[in-house]
Amino acid sequence: MDAPSPLAFWARRQAHETAIHRADAESALGGRPGYPPDFATDGIDELIMGFGQRRKYRPSAEHQGSLDVRTTDTGHAWHVAAEDGRIQARREPPGSGSGSPAQASVAGPASGLYLFLWNRSDAGQAGVTIAGDPGFLTLWQSSVRVRWG
């Protein structure tokens, strides 16, 4: 899901920025948008592999843990771990689980998971299931809070 060129990178970034602004606007009116599964899956990937890897979003070094993320409708999966203040994230082959055991897992339909991970919906509204110790998920979500000005 890597962008093949700077133009494609920025088009992707702007598409997800616009989608999250839409979610914010609809939320202000009491609604919640739905997104096509492939688009939402790409937005999850953008958050985990793009924003989540940036230094400004890293949790402090004393916080460690791991998380598996999986879309139930597209079969895409990611493994996210923090060690010594560094985020290590990787994509897992579609339909597979993580090769490493995680402290927690979060799974749901791509559209709901997209909104949940971008901090635009709670788990219940999004149809997301959380298993295991949710501590690292909570830490990761509080660290990776993308806001556009």
Image (cartoon, rainbow, N blue to C red):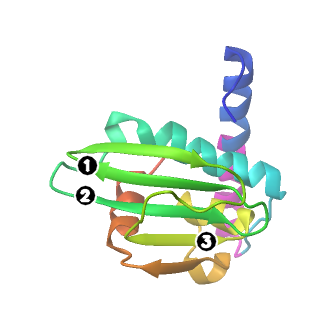
Query: Where does the image place residue 23, in percent across and percent down from the top left?
Result: 68, 59
Q: Are marks 1 and 2 in contact (CB under 8 Å)?
A: yes
The residue at 62%/56% (across/down) is: 77
Can you give x and y, in whole percent of width and height, for residue 112 in the image? 69, 68
Task: Assess whether mark 2 and mark 3 are in contact (beta carbons under 8 angstroms).
Answer: no
Q: Is residue 41 above or below residue 67?
A: above
User: What residue would you read off at disc 1?
Assistant: 83
Say what secondary structure mark 3 lies in: strand
Q: Residues within 10 Å of mark 1 (few under 14, many from 20)?
A: some
Q: Earlier in the sequence, mark 3 or mark 2?
A: 2
Q: Residue at x 34, y 66 (%)?
A: 136
Q: Residue 64, which numbered label?
A: 2
Q: CA distance from mark 1 to mark 3?
A: 23 Å
The span from disc 1 to disc 2 (Cα, nearest Å) is: 5 Å
The local crowd at label 3, few if under 14, some if 14 to 19, many if 20 or more residues have their Cα within 10 Å, is many
Residue 125 at least partly seen = yes
Instruction: Please tell me the numbered disc located at residue 30.
Output: none
| Residue under the point 37% across and 53% down | 81
Q: Which region shows up in magenta?
A: 17-30
Above or below residue 64? Residue 89 is: above
Q: Nearer the viewer, residue 6 or 95?
A: 95
